[in-house]
Image: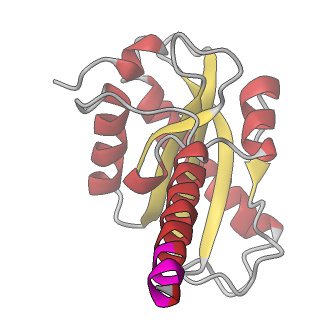
Amino acid sequence: MKLSKLTLTVALAGAVMFGVASSASAAEKNWTPPAHKIYGQKLSDETMAAHPELLSITLHGVPPGKTDVYTMFAGSYLDRVGNPDDPDDIDVSKKGITIVDPRWHRTQDNPKKFVILMPMRDAKGDNIGLVVYAWKNPPANANNSADELSYLKKANDLRDALAKKIPSYNALFDEAK
């Protein structure tokens, strides 16, 4: 009988632990995308297909109907869609600043990358959130003016091309056609 109680206790404890773990994992998300593919995701997919030099592109902002819920709503890491934004992401969205390679101190990252966080714009040129570009295989030490300016120019070009395809912020959440 004691063994049965012990087995039951262990089983219940495991169920509680797994229940807590799964609810904690779900709590990490602050937005759930709709079941259909949104236009923002289509733009992300198209950018990745056209630019093999990119490791990723992600689009961030506050989904329509939400308030102060800064999240990644589209991008090349589908498992991260709905993750809350980091403080530097929110700064870019709120302040309209650009951050050049916030990962400068992470020289051992695998894979190596060079990252630019910048305001996302719509076709009118208004800042409407955040776009993050990460490039594969940067030079061994890309933390010099020439390389930083080169990546910033590439990011500006990509962002400006993207902006032409965005009639409005809310359109990014429409069903992709």
Above or below: residue 62 compared with residue 64? below
**Residue beneath the point at 73% across and 47% down:** 86
Q: Main secondary structure of the magenta part?
A: helix
Residue 7, magenta (yes or no): yes
Residue 116, magenta (yes or no): no
Can you give x and y, in whole percent of width and height, for residue 49 in the image? 27, 55
* Along the line of sight, the residue nearer the viewer: 161 or 101: 101
Asked if one can make out residue 154 in the rendered structure from this viewpoint, the answer is no
| Coloration of the structure image | secondary structure
In the displayed structure image, the side of residue 21 where residue 102 appears, left or right: right
Above or below: residue 57 compared with residue 112? above
In the displayed structure image, the side of residue 50 where residue 67 appears, left or right: right
Magenta span: 3-8
**Residue beneath the point at 75% across and 67% down:** 103
**Residue beneath the point at 16% across and 24% down:** 177
Asked if one can make out residue 7 in the rendered structure from this viewpoint, the answer is yes
Above or below: residue 70 compared with residue 74? above
Can you give x and y, in whole percent of width and height, for residue 51 in the image? 35, 58
Give the tally of numbered discs: 0
In the displayed structure image, the side of residue 77 where residue 92 appears, left or right: right
Q: Quadrant of residue 113?
A: bottom right
Can you give x and y, in whole percent of width and height, for residue 6 in the image? 53, 83
Can you give x and y, in whole percent of width and height, for residue 64 in the image? 51, 13
**Residue beneath the point at 62% across and 49% down:** 153
The residue most toward the front is: 1
